[in-house]
């Protein structure tokens, strides 16, 4: 019989709706039930594409004996971390403080007042590698609750007091100033020390794609000409694109590599990773395609940006025009046993190549993609890579034919599951990536996909007060309020879309969301909170400026506020951006890998950012040429406004106001803090002014 999760919309929660565990969703009613019964709460947090979440579910939550123990002595609450990042953040902070590490599934035991007192992540069904079994943990907590409840209450009280006493105010500089040249150079030096000069990226295994750090390095190179910064970007992007972390057949990136060489990925594919990396490779192409002169690196960057964009549209786009959250790492292995195996959809053996391609083309494909008899993955299978220095361009037709046939054969395999909830924040990242990639490579279909997603966010996620719902599914908004990253990343996406399309309405919507950031998420000292002032009260109001898998709400808000101020001339938004960047001044030199987007925004603030107003009739090729030159400018954080003189956008957007044509010709005005250079009608001159 289905449990209470059967009425939820989250795909992750629905995966547990038929468990024998009597799950509750996160709700006041669950904690009231715990108080009524006098039992503790088991909080289990995960997400739909989490491999070890699936493992623990199969081993423990589907086991009748374990479920009976849970149901008799606990109130079990299941949370989708992607749907409730606030709940996840608060208890993950407690887990990391207590154990020194964290991850998912996250397993936390709470009092009926939601105070945590015992922590963990994955627990096996039997004792293993020094870990107790999940059953032993349940028995131990049950016993402690029954026999030593006062002691448990004291522990919970100390933990809550410790969490409540944490504040970031002390980390902010007294003058709340953004990072200057010295702090940004210190961050570069720190990244240089941690750079893996052999394999690219930073640190060892596991290795995550550092998209936000690489965006900082691209901007730093544009501003300073630093060769070291650009070399780190080039080496890392090349290694990732040629490695197993990149899907060599279908495009798109897996979550991370389990090794230091980018060879074997953890195969789940997340929207946020692919949106960030699509935009990064488009920006790398913009940097390296000097004057349109193609070379091997710029060709690679262009290919990866477009293939990743096409992957998002093909695999993650929903019927309503938004983008789904993720594809699972696991899928049915095709044996008929129903067994789900990580990577089964993606890996190949030499025999499988021969079955699809025949002997000669299989031999060619094995050499091209690094498929060996020994394999690079489990059971003799190989993850496809491009191990050779040559990209096969000399035989491009044969490579294309092989890829097409392998992709068609792979499509017949059981597909990984898709988490089809639409998350506002990650769709904002996708909108920015698709809009810019479409503009750079003359792909109006990608710009349209970005516009459709933006339309969905306005129609479904935004209410009449311009407040955002975090998620939707099948065109219906979820009950979850947006958090800071939702408002910030949606504003970022809308501002990028406005720059590409010239439609000022997207700037207007971004302004609504950023005004909410100022009112609901910003403290008097300029610090930012992850949840709104009127959001549900948790044991601590979450607040984290460090970037993780995607930009933190804090740094994303700083970037969107800065861009909006540059387009509108709003001193209020500029001041808020600069105050928010104070945390980057404090942390950038000490932990640059974990505040990469903040450093990138710091580069934009230091550079101005440049404000470009392109004025001219929409159907004039000269207007289009100036607009393209503006979009391809590499000066950090450049904002672009496009409009015809006298149009509604020109009248409503301050950057365009009172900008005439020059001798009757379309013109571009390059400004900084709304102080402008003489206008130009020459795209090449404009490009030169925006080189950094």
Image (cartoon, grey):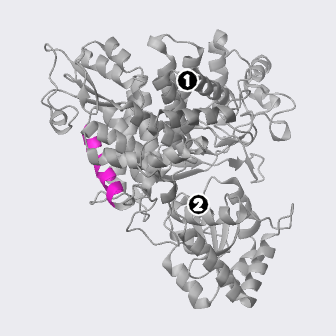
Can you tell which quarter of the image residue 503 is in? top left
Badge nearest the viewer, 2 or 1: 1
Look at the picture and state if 39 lies above or below 277: below
According to the picture, the residue beneath numbered tag 2 turns out to be: 12
Q: Residue at x 50, y 71 (%)?
A: 538
Q: Quick one: SS at disc 1?
A: helix
Quadrant assignment for the N terminus: bottom right
Q: Nearest the camera: 675 or 322?
A: 675
Give the crowd class for mark 2: few <14, some 14-19, many >=20 residues within 10 Å. Answer: many
Q: Residue at x 57, y 77 (%)?
A: 114
Look at the picture and state if 334 lies above or below 4: above
Q: In the image, residue 465 lies at what x, y percent?
A: 27, 60
The circle drawn on residue 21 is: none
Determine if residue 473 is in view.
Answer: no
Q: Closer to the N terminus: mark 2 or mark 1?
A: 2
Q: Please, what is the dominant secondary structure of the magenta stretch?
A: helix
Can you tell which quarter of the image residue 566 is in? top left
CA gap, disc 2 and disc 1 = 34 Å
| Residue 186 covered by magenta stretch | no
Look at the picture and state if 400 lies above or below 481: above
Q: Residue at the far front: name it.
A: 174
| Residue 505 covered by magenta stretch | yes
According to the picture, the residue beneath numbered tag 1 turns out to be: 301
Give the crowd class for mark 1: few <14, some 14-19, many >=20 residues within 10 Å. Answer: many
Q: Quick one: SS at disc 2?
A: helix
Look at the picture and state if 496 lies above or below 625: below
Q: In the image, residue 164 lies at what x, y percent?
A: 54, 70
Q: Nearest the camera: 338 or 3?
A: 3
Q: In the image, residue 406 lies at what x, y percent?
A: 67, 28
Q: Tell me which segment is drawn in magenta.
A: 504-519
């Amino acid at each position: 019989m289905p449990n209470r999760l059967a009425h939820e919309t989250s795909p992750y929660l629905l995966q547990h709706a038929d468990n024998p565990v009597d799950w509750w969703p996160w709700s006041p009613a669950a904690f009231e039930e715990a108080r009524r019964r006098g039992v503790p709460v088991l909080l289990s947090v995960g997400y739909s594409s989490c491999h070890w979440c699936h493992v623990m579910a199969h081993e423990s939550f589907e086991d009748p004996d374990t479920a009976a123990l849970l149901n008799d002595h606990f109130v079990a609450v299941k949370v989708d971390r992607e749907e409730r990042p606030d709940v996840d953040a608060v208890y993950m902070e407690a887990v990391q403080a207590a154990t020194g590490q964290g991850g998912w599934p996250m397993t936390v035991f709470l009092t009926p007042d939601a105070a945590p007192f015992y922590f963990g992540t994955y627990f096996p069904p039997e004792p293993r590698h020094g870990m107790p079994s999940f059953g032993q943990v349940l028995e131990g907590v049950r016993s402690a609750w029954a026999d030593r409840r006062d002691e448990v209450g004291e522990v919970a009280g100390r933990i809550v007091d410790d969490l409540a006493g944490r504040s970031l105010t002390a980390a902010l500089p007294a003058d709340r100033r953004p990072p200057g040249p010295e702090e940004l150079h210190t961050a570069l030096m720190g990244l240089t020390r941690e750079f893996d000069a052999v394999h690219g990226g930073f640190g060892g295994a596991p290795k995550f794609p550092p998209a936000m750090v690489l965006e900082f390095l691209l901007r730093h190179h544009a501003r300073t000409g630093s060769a070291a910064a650009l070399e780190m970007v080039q080496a890392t992007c090349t290694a990732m694109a040629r490695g197993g972390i990149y899907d060599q057949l279908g495009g798109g990136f897996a979550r991370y590599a389990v090794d230091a060489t980018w060879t074997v990925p953890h195969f789940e594919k997340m929207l946020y990773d692919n949106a960030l990396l699509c935009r990064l490779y488009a920006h790398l192409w913009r940097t390296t395609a000097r004057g349109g002169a193609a070379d091997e690196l710029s060709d690679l960057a262009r290919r990866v940006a477009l293939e990743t964009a096409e992957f998002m549209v093909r695999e993650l786009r929903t019927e309503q025009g938004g983008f789904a959250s993720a594809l699972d790492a696991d899928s049915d292995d095709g044996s008929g046993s129903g067994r789900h195996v990580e990577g089964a959809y993606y890996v190949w053996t030499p025999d499988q190549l021969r079955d699809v391609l025949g002997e000669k083309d299989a031999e060619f494909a094995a050499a091209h993609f690094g498929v060996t008899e020994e394999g690079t993955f489990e059971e003799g299978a190989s993850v496809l890579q491009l191990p050779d220095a040559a990209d096969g361009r000399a035989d491009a037709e044969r490579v294309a034919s092989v890829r097409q046939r392998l992709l068609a054969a792979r499509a017949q395999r059981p597909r990984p599951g898709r988490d089809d909830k639409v998350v506002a924040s990650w769709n904002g990242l996708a909108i920015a990536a698709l809009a810019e990639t479409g503009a750079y490579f003359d792909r109006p279909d990608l710009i349209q996909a970005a516009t459709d997603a933006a339309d969905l966010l306005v129609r479904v996620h935004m209410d009449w007060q311009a407040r955002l719902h975090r998620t939707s599914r099948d065109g219906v908004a979820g009950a979850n309020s947006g958090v800071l990253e939702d408002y910030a990343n949606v504003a970022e996406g809308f501002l990028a879309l406005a720059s590409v399309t010239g439609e000022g309405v997207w700037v207007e919507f971004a302004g609504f969301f950023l005004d909410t950031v100022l009112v609901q998420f910003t403290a008097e000292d300029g610090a930012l909170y992850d949840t709104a002032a009127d959001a549900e009260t948790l044991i601590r109001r979450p607040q984290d400026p460090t970037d993780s898998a995607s930009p933190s709400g804090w740094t994303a808000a700083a970037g969107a506020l800065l861009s909006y101020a540059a387009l509108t001339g709003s001193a209020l938004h500029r001041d808020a951006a600069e105050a928010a960047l104070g945390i980057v001044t404090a942390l950038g030199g000490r932990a640059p890998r974990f505040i990469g987007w903040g450093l990138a925004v710091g580069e934009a603030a230091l550079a101005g950012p440049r404000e470009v107003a392109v004025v001219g009739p929409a159907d004039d090729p000269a207007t289009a040429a100036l607009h393209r030159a503006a979009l391809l400018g590499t000066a950090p954080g450049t904002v672009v406004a496009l409009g015809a003189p006298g149009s509604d956008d020109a009248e409503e957007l301050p950057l365009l106001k009172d900008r005439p044509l020059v001798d009757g010709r379309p013109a571009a005005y390059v400004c900084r803090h709304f102080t402008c250079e003489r206008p130009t009608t020459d795209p090449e001159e404009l490009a030169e002014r925006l080189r950094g």
